[in-house]
Amino acid sequence: MSTKDVLKGESRDGYVKIDRYNDEKIEAVATHYKDILGQLGEDPEREGLIKTPERVAKALQYLTHGYDLKPDEILKSAMFEEDYSQMVVVKDIEVYSMCEHHMLPFFGKAHIAYIPNGHIVGLSKIPRVVDAFARRLQVQERLTNEIRDCIQNTLNPMGVAVVMECRHLCMAMRGVQKQNSVTTTSAFTGTFLSNDKTRAEFLRLITASLD
């Protein structure tokens, strides 16, 4: 299968975004979406829709590129021995994912903490792990657990805490149409699970303001 790299422009700092698309997958998915447009009563040949099937196919490939990533390898790439045993918290991590039931987006924030047990990890790797799991067809409950388990199994810390707060367009745009509802999920291991004070400290930290 061929993969094409597409340059998407250059930013001020010289960074060039490269999107990688598999041409065969794009063509196959686009063909189906052209048929779908017709089934919906649209004319897929009209000007505004001629390139829509290809655009949708590329968007879906990007939105599900997490299947090609190995979250544990992301963490292992920046693990360091360090004598630090206090809580490390990374909060307000942006989350964008796709609900597997209706293939509509859900989005929000993740708050993650771990207590090192001889190893720390580069802070940017934690949001990358979130993305690696979020860029798949998901449910929020499983996504929360997968992030927790990956950090626990890879770093072997004394405990991991994950809290996610998301809005689901499958609830806001269809069904009950409750636009302002927020779904919160949590998952804990180790000290966060067994020690009420540690868990309470984490919850206090993720709700506190730095202002």
Image (spheres, grey):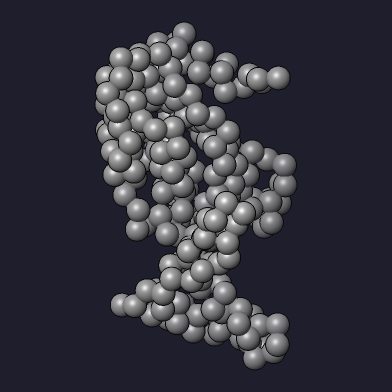
> x, y (%) of residue 58?
51, 71
Q: Determine the residue positioned at 65% across, 91% down.
A: 45
Instruction: Tell me the quarter of the picture where residue 78 sits.
Output: top left
Q: Is residue 112 left or right of residue 92?
A: left
Whether residue 32 is visible here, answered yes or no, is no
Q: Residue furthest top?
A: 197
Q: Determine the residue positioned at 65% across, 20% down.
A: 210
Quadrant holding the N terminus = bottom left
Q: Determine the residue positioned at 54% across, 29% down.
A: 91
Instruction: Tell me the quarter of the picture where residue 24 sits.
Output: bottom left
Foreground pick, 150 / 170: 150
Count of labels shown? 0
Quadrant holding the C terminus = top right
In the rendered view, would you say 198 is above or below 14? above
Q: Determine the residue positioned at 47% across, 16% down.
A: 199
In the rendered view, would you say 42 is above or below 171? below
Foreground pick, 105 / 100: 105
> x, y (%) of residue 205?
56, 18
> x, y (%) of residue 106?
58, 50
Q: Is residue 83 left or right of residue 102?
A: left
Q: Residue furthest bottom?
A: 45
Instruction: Tell me the quarter of the picture where residue 117 sits.
Output: top left
Whether residue 93 is visible here, answered yes or no, is yes
> x, y (%) of residue 147?
40, 38
